[in-house]
Image: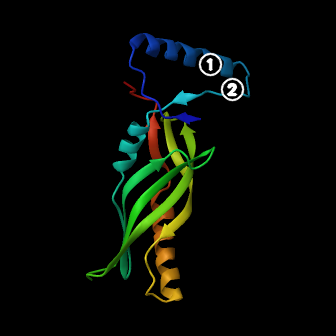
Amino acid sequence: MIQTKGALRCPRHAISAILALTALAALAMVGCDDLTINLTIDKSRIQERVEKKFPIEQKMDPVTVVLSNPVIDFEAGPDRIGLTTDVKVGRDGGLLAVTGKARSSGKVRYEPSDATFYMTEVKIEEVDLPLKLANEARRTKMRELVNATIEGSLKDIPLDSLQNKN
């Protein structure tokens, strides 16, 4: 479960949290299979970390797809995190470009080896491009290019880490 509250600021609370996590880890080692831990993660920290991965530019002859301005959405579902980006599709070397929005979502996975939470299993929810003048084949091709860029670029986005928390 991800909650969007401020990070721990008081050293006493930090020590209490460390002791609680240590106790929970000890319980897990003695055979508790159904252990649940709730963490509070600062939304702005995740937003900042995701922004560092953008813009994403993918050249797909004869066009280039650019994803930019990511916005994290914690309301995507009970076990998913959403991501909305601006999309720009343009011909290489050309002046004409189509801009729109793409909305995707992914599951949150914790990787113990580096103590990091990742967005995985990315699913494209919606691609909104103003293609009213294009024929159906061209609209389908544009959406396929954007989907391929999203699927290929948004795998395992690091969201937050338990290491070096201040």
Which of pointers 1 and 2 lies earlier in the amino acid sequence? 1
Residue 88, image x, y percentages: 36, 70
Residue 70, image x, y percentages: 39, 54
Residue furthest toward the bottom? 135
Q: Is residue 84 above or below residue 26?
A: below
Q: Specify whether 74 is left or right of 94.
A: right
Question: Label 2, on which residue?
Answer: 35
Q: Nearer the viewer, residue 142 or 78?
A: 78
Q: Which of 68 and 148 is in front in this view?
A: 68
Total marks in image: 2
> Can you tell which quarter of the image residue 96 is in?
bottom left
Q: Which of 42 and 61 is in front in this view?
A: 42
Query: Which quarter shows the N terminus?
Result: top right
Q: Which of 91 and 6 is in front in this view?
A: 6
Residue 155, image x, y percentages: 50, 55
Q: Do the residues labelled 1 and 2 touch (CB within 8 Å)?
A: yes
Q: Within 10 Å of the Cα at label 1, are there few (<14), some (14-19), or many (20+) other Cα atoms?
A: some
Name the residue at 52% across, 87% down.
137
Q: Within 10 Å of the Cα at label 2, are there few (<14), some (14-19), or many (20+) other Cα atoms?
A: few
Question: Label 1, on which residue?
Answer: 24
